[in-house]
Image: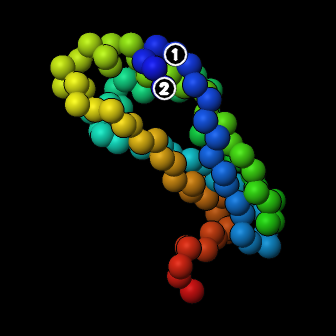
Amino acid sequence: VVPGETALAFYKAKNPTDKPVIGISTYNVVPFEAGQYFNKIQCFCFEEQRLNPQEEVDMPVFFYIDPEFAEDPKMAKVDLITLSYTFFEAKEGQHLPLPGYQ
């Protein structure tokens, strides 16, 4: 992604349970210092999401990296920014299984 230009990315989410799940996502940017330059224009994380049983969906994020990123000497050696999401249940009484745990 070129700083200043918009980009669109998709994240895949799947509800592996037999019940609907309503949740919200939080994001993380690594390296931490680059987070101030990451700007979301439109994101699935702005609202609760409902995933029906066994449903798999692509969730879009429309974003850009502030052009000032390229001018910041602290970012001179940063050539990779990682954006990740964690999905949390937003409604009581519903439990997501943790991957790899019984």
User: What residue do we see at 72% from left, 46% from top?
Assistant: 58
Q: Position of residue 99 (x, y in %)?
A: 56, 73
Which of the 4 quarters of the picture holds residue 92? bottom right
The amino acid on which the numbered mark 1 sits, given as a three-letter code, is Glu
Q: Which residue is mark 1?
A: 5
Q: Position of residue 60 (x, y in %)?
A: 66, 36
What residue occupies the far left of the structure in this picture?
Answer: 73
Q: Is residue 91 above or below residue 46?
A: below
Label 1: how many residues lie within 10 Å, few (<14), some (14-19) or many (20+)? Answer: few
- Badge number at residue 1: 2
Q: Position of residue 11 (x, y in %)?
A: 62, 46
Residue 39 shows in the view: no
| Between 53 and 79, the one nearer to me in the picture | 79
Which of the 4 quarters of the picture holds residue 37? top left
- Mark 1 secondary-structure assignment: loop
User: What residue do we see at 56% from left, 47% from top?
Assistant: 25
Q: Is residue 59 above or below residue 16?
A: above
User: What residue do we see at 66% from left, 51% from top?
Assistant: 12
The amino acid on which the numbered mark 2 sits, given as a three-letter code, is Val
| Between 91 and 39, the one nearer to me in the picture | 39
Label 2: how many residues lie within 10 Å, few (<14), some (14-19) or many (20+)? Answer: few
Q: Horizontal placement of 75 versus 2: left or right?
A: left
Q: Horizontal placement of 95 versus 77: left or right?
A: right
Whether tag 2 and tag 1 are in contact, CB under 8 A, the answer is: yes
Q: What is the CA distance from the residue labelled 2 to the residue labelled 1?
A: 7 Å
- Badge number at residue 91: none
- Please identify the quadrant where the C terminus is shown: bottom right
User: What residue do we see at 51% from left, 48% from top?
Assistant: 85
